[in-house]
Amino acid sequence: MSLHDQDDPALRAAQEERLRAVWAPPRGIFLRWTDCNNNRVGVWYVLTAFGFMLFAGVLALIMRTQLAVPDNDLVGPGTFNQLFTLHGSMMMFLFAVPMFEAVSIILLPQLLGARDLPFPRLSAFGYWSFLIGGLFVGGSIFFNAAPDGGWFMYPPLTTRTDLSGLGADIWMLGLSFIEVSSVAAAVELIVGVLKCRPPGMRLNLMPLYAWYILVVAVMILFAFPPLIAGDILFEMERLLDWPFFDARRGGDPLLWQHLFWIFGHPEVYIIFLPSIALFAMLVPTFANRHLLGYPWIVLAAVGTAFLSFGLWVHHMFTTGLPKISLAFFSAASEAVAIPTGVQIFVFIATLWAGRVTWSTPLLYATGSLAIFVIGGLTGVMVAVAPFDWQAHDSYFVVAHLHYVLIGGTLMPLFAGLYYYWPLVTGKKLSDRLGRVAFWMLFVGANLTFFPMHLSGLMGMPRRVFTYPAELGLGGLNMASTLGAWLFAAGVAVICVDLSLSPRRVRAVRNPWNAGTLEWLAHPEDEDWGIRSVPLIESRYPIWDQTDFVREVDEGRFFLPDAQEGRRETIVTSVLDARPLAVIRLGTPSIKPMLTAVALGGVFILTTYHLYWAALVSGVATLALALWWLWTGTAEIPEKPCKPIGHGLELPLYLSGPSAPGWWAMFITMMADATAFSGLVFGYFFFWTRHADFPPVALADGPGMAWPMLALFLGIASWLLTLGAREVHARKHVGMARLCLMIALVLSLAGIGAGLAGPWTHGMDPQAHSYPAIVWTLAIWAAAHAGVAAIMQGYALARSLAGRMDPEHDADLRNVTVNMHFYALTAIVTYATIGLFPQVT
């Protein structure tokens, strides 16, 4: 197809009709739930996360009303503990992170000029996991079963079942399930940014929003898995009495704090950076110029992410750590202000250098910066260890945290809401109501949280349900309560504005006159997203490329048709966005929903100690996942290539490092390896903390013979899988199948050998933390041997069924990526428990 072909109106009309038919959502309420189009999934995500935010806000209002006057009895101490635990947990786990993922799932395909992200069914699975887990955790308060140990759930108060009820299990297992959806979203976003950019969009031409989301998604891979590792140890202590945090039996409660805050402090920047990304999109629009300092803001985002992982002890200054540790982490906590400041000053400089058009979104953006800077300044204060010793666990910290979160997350999201609402719905929100709501939010936030600095310095501890009048804190707390109700009224005005939106007239296309790709969206809201995938030559192509919008609309770029009746988009190279292939995307399916329901059953049934039912649910999850993969991935196309326009022909199949599936497997394994590193960290944490680890009576551990045998079997299975990949590529299919069969048997044997060491040596995991952590590492390695066997069997079955051949070997190459990480797991596990340390 050439440019001139698109001059034929009949041809263009036929192409549009085919695109419309392919991308139209299913009919019927239930079938629409099965649609995996990322735009629609993202809208469900946003609405659900917004609902959880409103619910958590109501919990906060109840708390503030309880604290309005001294000696109040609106709620009792038990209910108050549930309120503040659930409020914090829902805001952090069910609103802040899912909301950024939801917004990104909507915006990224449009920003990248793609028809969709590469794994729309994975996005749908993530949404259903988030919804089920969120309802399970949030609904617990209606049954007086909500967690009551704080959103940080410090042991030993929460691990002892005689001191905490079912709420601790609901928190731990429910949020672990939600973390699965966060990792799934991170995989989707990373692969989408790296592999689905339009031709010509090199890394240095990416919209800053895409850069920020890439950085944040990578942060999720390294921040969430340590918490998953901690969750495993936490639940094994609660359910099986394995003493990881019980100091009487060699455990240490500080291990949980390390694992939690390795997640918890990067979490603050995981929710802050996407909000800054919204600034990076709307500030150039209303400054009417390109953003200044593009390379500097990218480096600042990366630097913020890097430094955020060196700050977790910032929350542990009062735990008795060595002074050298306090000095290092205090310096790191203060250093993070530098890249953060760079980003803020870039936005200020862009506004200063431009011709500013003041608007409701920009009003929210500038107001949020003012609030965030106050929170940042108090953050520098608590980064100084001596001051933190005085302010720790006081309302000063509550004030600091909420200034950062409201200024760095909530207010920017409202700015993005007013900016992008016309893109999502075709309707603008009311400027008048938006400005009224802004001033209510701005005044309410400061009236609520600024007095908390003073009450904290006057000695009011956090997490108390009441206080005596003699402290003289009644006036400050009443001011905070009035401010909270004013802030809530501002949120209510925004809700009214949103509810009135459907009655308003449709906005013009690109009402803000922005320059980035997402505003190619048409007011008629065609289901295919973008009419043709463009060639990019600028960071702001709508502003800089002549006749850009008209040529996109007329299908004069790439992939303007859907001749085969399939949902498709273009895959490009990571660095310079060269077109590599056309990939077929997931169509509407009930499989992601069913898989999420079955997996949710594993976590929920385990909470209530229904272990056999949980096992059945786990088997169902595996069966559904295999069904999903068998019918929906690595499909052999009906032809090798297809034309995409301008004389280009691209293959319809990719495998290896060029393929999105290979990247998805690699990224998932990185998350898995990070969780594993959290467990290994626990082993060596005990060794460094306790002079008698392992105890002399348990010095033999699991011995050397069984761990070394398990290691040999794991390495042999890995090498045979590599061999299968190589001989298969040389068209020796029978030899490849034989290698896979032997590798599968070795992986299964590795399960028994890995568990035989602690079993035959009589290691009792309830007696001491040493056998408990040895058993945990052995079970982890054995479970991964089982996963390796399933994957090897899957690749073998695909070959035998004719769904994999030497030219179409994505399944085998992806299985090999998993085997690399399995080999690493085996080496580290069995070397650790079999060779080091030993007591003589």
Image (tube, helix red, strand yellow):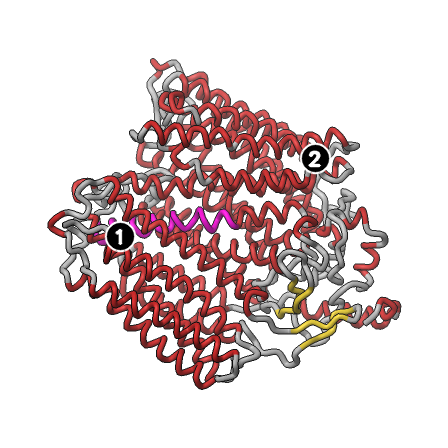
Front one among 395 and 754: 754
| Residue type marked 1 | Met
Say few, some or many: other residues with alpha carbon within 10 Å of mark 1 (under 14 / 14 to 19 / 20 or more): some
Q: Which residue is mark 2?
A: 360
| Amino acid type of the residue that numbered disc 2 sits on in the rendered structure | Thr
| Residue 219 is covered by the magenta coloring | yes
Q: State the residue lying farthest toward the bottom.
A: 734
Q: Which residues are magenta?
A: 218-242
Camera-side residue of 538 and 700: 700
Residue 687 picture location, percent across and down: 24, 44
Q: Of residues 723 and 603, which is closer to you in this image? A: 723
Indicate left or right for 190 with 399 as reference.
right
Q: Could you say which quadrant of the image residue 328 lies in?
A: top left
**Residue at label 1?**
236
Residue at coordinates 82% horizontally, 51% vertically from top-left? Answer: 545
Disc 2 crowd, CA 10 A, few/some/many (<14, 14-19, 20+): many
Query: Is there CB contact under 8 Å for labels 2 and 1?
Result: no
Q: Image height check: is 595 above or below 92?
A: below
Q: CA distance from mark 2 to mark 1?
A: 50 Å
In this rendering, is residue 743 above or below 238? Answer: below
